[in-house]
Each structure stands twice: as C-alpha cells, then as structure tokens.
Amino acid sequence: MSKILFISQDEEKTKKYSQIFKKPYEFFTSSDENTALEIGESCMPDVIITDNSIKFAKSVIKKLKSILPSSAYILLTSKSELEPDIIKNVNAFLTDEMSDNLILSTVHVNLKTKNSLEQLSGANKDLADSLYRLNVLYSTSSQFAGSLDKQKLVDYMIEGMDKALSFDLTCTLAFCTEAEPVLILNSLYEISEELLSAIKLRTVLNYKSLFENKTPPFEIDAENLKVIKNVKYPANRFTFTLFRYDNMFAPISLGDNFFGCIEIFKEIPFSSDDATYFQTIAQQVSLPLKSASLYQEIKETNQKLEKLERLKSEFISIVSHELRTPLTAIKNSLDILTGGKCGELNDAGEKFLLMAKRNVQRLSGIINDLLDLSKIEAGKMDYHFANMNIHSVIDYVKTSLSGLAKEKGLNLIAEETENLPEICADSQRLEQVLTNLVSNAIKFTPEGKTITIRSHIANANQLNPNDCFKDDLKNLSGDYIVVCVEDEGIGIAQKDLTRAFDKFAQIENSLSRKVGGSGLGLPIAKQLLQAHSGAIWCDSEPDKGSRFYFAIPVAHSYELLH
C-alpha cells in the first residue's frame, strides 16, 4: 500500500486531496513543519505533496529530503514563477485547476518512477556485492597460488570467508597444518569451556559423518582434540544460542586427499550466493593444499637424500683413509721383498709378489678415486690454476702410458694441432682426466689396435656432441681447446652413453666385468672439467670404438667466464 503525505494549511485543499487518495492509499496530513517531519520519520511516505502557499514549504521539503531521499516530492502551486531552489528539490508539480484524474495520474507516474529507481538501486547494490565478492575470491585465489605453506593457505581461506561472508564463528578441522589434527576456531566473541566442549563434539561428529560407510582417514578424540582460538572481541561471550544460528559445512578435500572440514555460523541467514561462495573457496583451497603437501614430501625426501649423501661421503672418506694406512705398509713390504733386501726369491715367489704388487697399485688407485670424489662432493678439492699449454699434458700422459699400451700390444699415438693458444688450468688435474681416458681406452681396446690422442681449437658453436650431451654443452661460449681420445675398442651402446659418467657405473659386457674398476674415473673427470668451466662428452657404437672429448676454454675466454 502506497503512503502519501499531504502538507497544507488550507482545509479545503486538505479535504479535497483526502477524497482523491482514499483506498488503496494510506493518506497522512500535516499543517506544520514539525508534524510533517515526525510523520516522515515514522511512516516513511512514498509521495510527499507540499502546498507552496505555506511559508515553510521550501524548508520542509529540504528537511524531509535529507530523511527520505528516495521519496517522490510533488509541489502544489498556483504560481507560474518559482524559486530555483525549490524547483530542483521536487519531482513534479500540481495546480489547483487540475482534475482529480490528472492528479492521480501524476502521483501514479511518480510512484512508478520511485519504484523503478528503488529496483535499480537494489540491483546496483547486488551487483556491487557480487563484484566485491569476486574481487575477494580473486584476491584469495592469488594468495593460494603464491604459497606452499599449509598453515598460511588455511589462514587465507578463513580470511577470504570473513571478508565476503562476515561470519560469527568458523570451526576448521585441519589435518594438514600440524603433526596432529587441530581445530582452528575464528570467533567474533569469547567461547566458554562448556560451549567449546560442545563445538568439539559437533566437529568430530560432522567429520565422521563424511565417512558413513568407510573408515575415516584419521581417528580423533573430541576430549583430546587440540584447539587454536582466535577471538576478535573477547569482552563479549557466545552462549549456546550459537547453535540456532544459520550454518554451512563443507569438506576440504581433493580426490583421495583429505585435508579437513569447515563449518561456519552466522546469526543472519545465509543466502544462496553465500552458499556458492563458501563451497567455491572451500574447494579452491584443496588444490594448493595438495601441492603444498607434495612440496613438503619432496622437501623431506631431499633432506633425507642429502643426509644419506653426506653420510655416504663421510663413510667413503673414513674407509678410504683407514684402508690407505695398512695399504701403504703392505706396499712398502712388497717393495722390500721384490727389491731383494730379504734374500733371493725363486721364480714362483717373485711371480706372486709382483701379482700382489699390481693389485696393491690397483687398490691404491681405487682408494685415490674415492678420496677425490669425497673431496669434490665436499667442495674441498684444491686447484692450482695457471696459464699453460695442452701439449705438455698430452706429452706427459702419452709418455707415462706408452709402456702399458705396448704391454697390451697397442699403438698409442698423438696427432696434435700445432701452436694452440694457452689455457688457464690445473695441469695435475688435466693430467688426471686425460690419464683416465687413455687408461680406459687401453683397458677396452683389443690387441693390435690403435689409440689416438688429438687436439684442436674450436668455437663453442662448432661443437657437435651427441644429442644426449647437448644440455651439458649449451652454456659454453667462446673458444675452446678440444682434446679427443679415440680407440678401436668394444664401444658403448647409445642407451649407455650418459651412464658412463654416472658414479660407480659399469657398462654391462663381458670385457668390462673382466677388467673391473671403481666406476669413478669418468664421474671424477666430469667434475674436474666443470671446475675448469669446461665439459666432457663421448660418441660411440658397439664394436666400432669410442671417442671421448673434453673441452677447456682458452685463457682469454676463461677470464671472461670468471
């Protein structure tokens, strides 16, 4: 029913308008300003008709408009000229000469306009609320995406719900934030111990209801359930009437991953939009919680692996040192015996002592490899860099291993490019790398074949390694001295090329089992070359020999890299 207030001191006019606005209208009249204002505040009329003949017309319209800005204001006037101030504060005009039907029509039009404006205002408010919630949802989603901390993710979820839903209490049962289940209470007011016990029991029952025909993933006891309380206004206290509030409940889960559940209470009933937002944000937090759980598992696994790697390195270092001491004594004793200082040896005795001496040397080499690997992994390997020429390294290794190659009936040659530029390197470590490559070639090359050491200069973009080594060389730039050790031995299958540089790896074939070895030479060589800002790679085919390459930056390129 529309309400109309008529303000006039003219009894005839008041009587006339009372007759016009009978039912279905609710009609009020006033002849003074104070009464008009009281009716305006208490009855909130939809239409206010003010007689312009009263002295306080302009004043009462302004005051009423401050109280009722959405009402329709109509001025009853007999004047053709009106003050600008009063014109701008009214929506329509009536005159004494107008018929009753025209008066009714004018009021109807203004009522329709008022109703339309109210609907539009309501729609705008709903739109503003929706935009605000979308903004909160976007902001909360961004926070979810930016964190792998499970406690923060739960806090962001509760904060987002508080902004959009203005809850009185949330009860979040979380299985992911601590080592044990925890009930997180975000409350507007303080909660008594009795109410807290009831909330805990309700939470446990809600949790178990999610797994009616299944075994819950966690067993929880309401009495011993850990509680974290966050209270906004502790001066006030909730009572058991809290359970009469409107509430919503949702699990926090993703597939087989269960992270907890949440219940939210609010004294004012929730709308359908509230329910949609609540379910959306409860679902949205599940994916980042799963990611956070996986991240934590990976982090813990890495820590365990790091610990195992550290223990392994310490074990290798300790065992290697403990082996070296008695091995030195054995070697010295063998040297004394084979040197004839303890008397003459028969042929059989000398044969067995020489066999023992060779195996002591072999074991000593394995121990040295273990110690080198331990130092490299601990970052304690010493390097003495200086400008030098690769020719000296190749010449030293060729001279040292020519005798061993000759014993096996192999031809060891060097084909070097002359006048190569200097490199900045530790000569002893490069000799160790090249010695390893040539020794391997000697081990795996049949009698009567040739092993060739080559050297040349090349730019990084001219290097063309096998596809499986491209990542190892992608960061190289500038000029490099490249050394290649080529043999005519048993070769390596394509699938085993990268395995050759794995620690303790032995490529599976009959000859590799026969010659043995620690499987550490190539991994150590790779680490040593990386310390020189270089790289190592190989190319091979079964029964067609192998080519092992390593590259060291020339001196000026090394300075640029460092």
Image: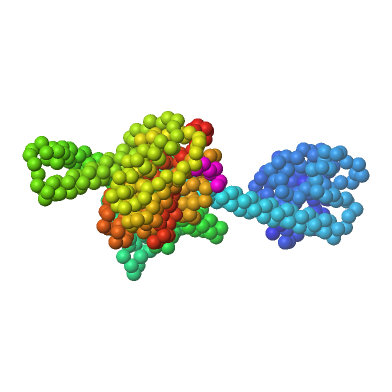
| Quarter of the rendering occupied by the N terminus | bottom right
Residue in front for this viewpoint, 380 or 62: 380
Residue in front for this viewpoint, 331 or 268: 331
Residue 444 on the magenta span: no
Residue 271 located left or right of residue 121: left
| Residue 132, horizontal then vertical, whole percent | 60, 49
Total marks drawn?
A: 0
Residue 343 located left or right of residue 561: left
**Which portion, as a residue range, is magenta?**
456-462
Residue in front for this viewpoint, 88 or 517: 517
Instruction: Spot the residue most to the right.
Output: 80
What residue is drawn where x is 33% and y is 67%?
Answer: 214
What residue is drawn where x is 55% and y is 47%?
Answer: 462
Please name the colour scheme applied to the rendered image.
Answer: rainbow
Residue 205 located left or right of residue 277: left
What residue is drawn where x is 31% and y is 65%?
Answer: 215
| Residue 126, horizontal then vertical, whole percent | 63, 54
Q: Is residue 253 visible?
A: no
| Residue 168, horizontal then vertical, whole percent | 46, 48
